[in-house]
Image: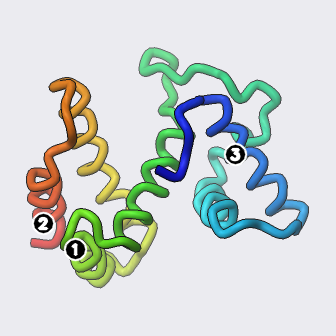
C-alpha cells in the first residue's frame, strides 16, 4: 500500500505534492504522480490548497470527495503499472485505444473499481477480482 490509513496524512500528502509542483520544487515519483492527477482536475485545486483539509464530503453535501476520486485514479494507475489483477494492463490498453483519451479511460475504469470496492465493503470482505475484471471487460466490448 502506498498510503497510510490516516485521512489527514493522506490529504496532506496531496496538498504537499501540489504545493511542490506549483513551486516547481523537486518531487518524488509518488508526488509527481499525485501532482499529475491533481493537474487533470482543476475543479479540485481549491480542495488541495484549502487550509481545512479535514472537511467531510458527504452525499448530502452535494459534492463527491475529491481525495477519494483522485485516490481511485492513483489506484487504477498502480494496478495498470503492475498488471494486478492480471489482465488489467491489457484492458487499459484496449480501452485507451477505444476512447483515445487516457483520462476518460481511467474514469470509466474508476466506475468499475468503485463499484467493486463498495460491494466488498458491504460484504465486509475482499474485493472480487474476477467480478472486477468482468466489469472492466464490458468497457471494451
Horizontal side of residue 36 vs 107, given as left or right: right
**Depth check: 108 or 36 in front?**
36
Quadrant in the rendering for residue 137: bottom left
Horizontal side of residue 120 vs 111, given as left or right: left
The kind of secondary structure element at disc 2 is helix
Q: In this rendering, is residue 66 above or below 97? A: above
Q: In this rendering, is residue 120 above or below 1? A: above
Local crowd size for mark 1, using a 10 Å CA cut-off: few (<14), some (14–19), many (≥20):
many
User: Which residue is located at x 56 percent, y 39 percent?
Assistant: 4
Which label sits in the foreground, 3 or 2? 3
**Depth check: 30 or 56 in front?**
30
Q: Position of residue 107 (x, y in %)?
A: 37, 57
Q: How is the image coloured?
A: rainbow
Tag 1 or tag 3, which sits nearer the N-term?
3
Q: Are marks 1 and 2 in contact (CB under 8 Å)?
A: yes
Which label sits in the foreground, 3 or 1? 3
Q: In this rendering, is residue 94 above or below 25? A: below
Residue 91 is marked as 1
According to the picture, the residue beneath numbered tag 2 turns out to be: 137
Q: In this rendering, is residue 11 above or below 37? A: above
The CA distance from mark 3 to mark 2 is 33 Å
User: Which residue is located at x 9 percent, y 72 percent?
Assistant: 141
**Number of marks drawn:** 3
Tag 2 or tag 3, which sits nearer the N-term?
3
Local crowd size for mark 2, using a 10 Å CA cut-off: few (<14), some (14–19), many (≥20):
some
According to the picture, the residue beneath numbered tag 3 turns out to be: 13
User: Which residue is located at x 51 percent, y 29 percent?
Assistant: 63
Q: Where is residue 33 in the image (x, y as percent from the top left)?
A: 61, 65
The kind of secondary structure element at disc 3 is helix
Amino acid at each position: 500500500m502506498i498510503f497510510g490509513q490516516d485521512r489527514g496524512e493522506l490529504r496532506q500528502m496531496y496538498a504537499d505534492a501540489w504545493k511542490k509542483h506549483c513551486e516547481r520544487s523537486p518531487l518524488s515519483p509518488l508526488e509527481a504522480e499525485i501532482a499529475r492527477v491533481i493537474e487533470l482536475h482543476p475543479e479540485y485545486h481549491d480542495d488541495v490548497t484549502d487550509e481545512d483539509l479535514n472537511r467531510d464530503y458527504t452525499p448530502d453535501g452535494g459534492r463527491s470527495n475529491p481525495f477519494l476520486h483522485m485516490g481511485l485514479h492513483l489506484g487504477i494507475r498502480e494496478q495498470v503499472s503492475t498488471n494486478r489483477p492480471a489482465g488489467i494492463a491489457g484492458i487499459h490498453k484496449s480501452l485507451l485505444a477505444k476512447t483515445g483519451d487516457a483520462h476518460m479511460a481511467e474514469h470509466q475504469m474508476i466506475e468499475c473499481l468503485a463499484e467493486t470496492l463498495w460491494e466488498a465493503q458491504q460484504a465486509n470482505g475482499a474485493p472480487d477480482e474476477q467480478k472486477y475484471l468482468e466489469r472492466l471487460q464490458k468497457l471494451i466490448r
